[in-house]
Image: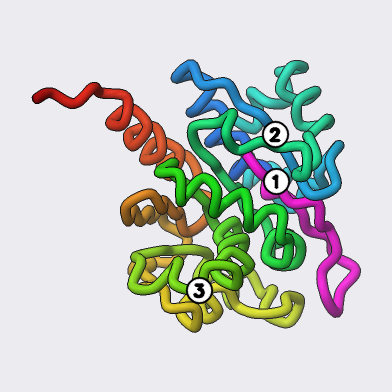
Amino acid sequence: MILTSHSAMENTDSKTGVWLGEFTDPYYELLDQGYEITLASPQGGQPPIDPISKLTENLTASNRRFNDDPAAQTAFGTTRKLDAVNPEEYDALFLPGGHGPLWDLANDETCARIILDFYNSGKPVAAVCHGPAALIKAVELQPELLNGKRVTAFSNAEEALVMKSDNIPYKLETRLKELGADFHAALIPMTSHVEVDGLLITGQNPLSAGPTAKALIERLQTNEVPETN
């Protein structure tokens, strides 16, 4: 799992970072299915957490579990630097959101090369909410990557609802469309929505984080079933 290291927003003193539930929901979905998880980030160490995601109204069951899980907290506080990650050692990639990826992961060549290594090796790449921003740099390196691909991410309508449009460098939905993606979103903002297109699995918003992980697990389990002649 690759997490953002970025906490600053534009035109405001408000902070951002990882949206906690978008990390904890997938983390425990994968952990409970027996997968080993390595956490990484551009700067390594403790990623910033969006303070709004820790408010009571945004807490999920997995957030509470995380608060009582010293092992998970230690893993989160000691993420590996991206340049120390060897994609060959892993079966899949997951990119949680929070607004932070709009700045760092979207412009991080190491992250982009990791994404492309997984994708071009036939390994699934999953991302949720603003996590798909990491695909922007990957498209710069491999321009056809998103052409016609069904994807989702935090929508322009949702950005307006959370009133962050003036505090971000661009709207992710618009940028993904510009890069050739076939963008789809739920009819009702802030409801769960997941798109699966081959190896690319994307979720729209915080409520989509767990379902995105479940779709990734389904893809991994399908790959594990031996083919019959």
Q: Is residue 161 above or below residue 54?
A: below
Q: Along the polypeptide, which appears first: circle 1 or circle 3?
A: 1
Q: Is residue 217 above or below residue 70?
A: below
Give the residue number, with chain letter if any, for mark 2.
39
Give the residue number, with chain letter if any, for mark 1.
3
State the mark number for residue 103. none
Q: Residue at x 51, y 56 (%)?
A: 205
Q: Position of residue 66 (x, y in %)?
A: 68, 26
Quadrant (top left, top right, bottom left, bottom right) of the N terminus: top right
Question: In the picture provided, is 223 more to the left or to the right than 95?
Answer: left
Residue 5 among those drawn in magenta: yes
Give the residue number, with chain letter if any, for mark 3.
143
Q: Assign a secondary structure to mark 3.
A: loop
C-alpha distance separating marks 2 and 1: 7 Å
The nearer-to-camera label among 1 and 3 is: 3
Magenta extent: 1-19
Q: Along the polypeptide, which appears first: circle 2 or circle 1?
A: 1
Residue type, label 3: Pro
